[in-house]
Amino acid sequence: MELQFTNPWLPGDAHVLDALAQSEITELRLLYDSSNYVFLADLSHPEYGEGLGVYKPVAGEAALSDFPYGTLHRREVAARELSTLLGWDIIPPVVERDGPRGIGSMQLFIDHDPDDHYFNLRGDEAYRDQFVRIAVFDLIANNADRKGGHLLLGPQQRIWGIDNALCFHRIDKLRTVVWDFADTEVPATLLADIDRVQSCIASEDEGSAAFRGLLHPAEVAALLKRADAMRSHPVLPEMYPWRCAPWPLV
Ligand SMILES: Nc1ncnc2c1ncn2[C@@H]1O[C@H](COP(=O)(O)OP(=O)(O)O)[C@@H](O)[C@H]1O
Ligand SMILES: [Mg+2]
């Protein structure tokens, strides 16, 4: 049985990014079900108290043939930035920072029951809108690794997408388990958000500077093209005949 943890810090806390970035890391515990070195970090801040983060040091990244080494932690932060720009609070707060194993990402730990993953929740109508929005996000972000266990059910029945390290490749690489909503029309409110963010990025508006700074310009250009494609055909696609699912599935 997996241990369950309770994080006093919540995604909506006003200072959560400062808390993640500035806290002292008092203890690291290896999370064993990961392919990279991923640590549960005990954090302590003089003002915000104690909390829990998930620390993924660059030094613990498994080398991949298609993603440039050393960029995965920044892709995690870019995914959060994109979700914030869209106004979709679906990626837990995460920062780039130094730690005992060097530079990496530090993400807020979301309290969850590991049995409440996508495959156990997808049939429940209560989560449908959240899953559709995540499927839209993964298309725009070009997520190459949306496993069932990367969708957590957090407090207040909110679904969170974790492990967004394999996003934003310039070549289409969508690999996901979220195919149950194929043929669903993308809701107009989501398209309006995409439209707004696309303009903000394309015009190099200051508001998108942090996001753009985390990726290669060619990756930003590819994102704009995917947004165009989504707006001209706003329907969630059918499962492709090849390379459509990550491995393992959970
Ligand atoms: N923000 C988070 N909140 C709660 N648990 C997390 C979070 N991020 C990762 N985990 C846990 O750690 C495991 C490994 O993290 P993940 O990001 O999937 O690493 P890897 O890149 O090695 O697959 C996840 O399967 C999940 O159980
Ligand atoms: Mg993972």
Image (cartoon, grey):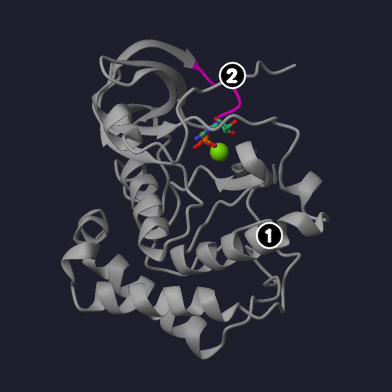
Task: Please state if 117 lies on the left or on the right of 7 as rendered.
Answer: right
Compared to residue 123, the image places residue 148 above or below, namely above
Mark whose residue sits in front, 1 or 2: 2
Magenta segment boundaries in residue numbering: 30-34
Residue at 67% over, 63% down: 129
- Secondary structure at badge 1 equals loop
The residue sitting at 63% across, 41% down in the picture is 156
Q: Nearer the viewer, residue 57 or 231?
A: 231
Ligand 2 quadrant? top right
Residue 54 rendering spot, x and y as whole percentages: 44, 28
Q: For the point 27% across and 30% down, which residue is it?
A: 21
Q: Amino acid at mark 1?
A: Val
Q: Residue furthest right?
A: 123
Q: Does the rendering let one see residue 58?
A: no
What label sits on residue 102 in the rendered view? none
Mark seen at residue 178: 1
Distance of label 1 from label 2 (alpha carbons):
27 Å
Kind of residue sitting beneath label 2:
Phe
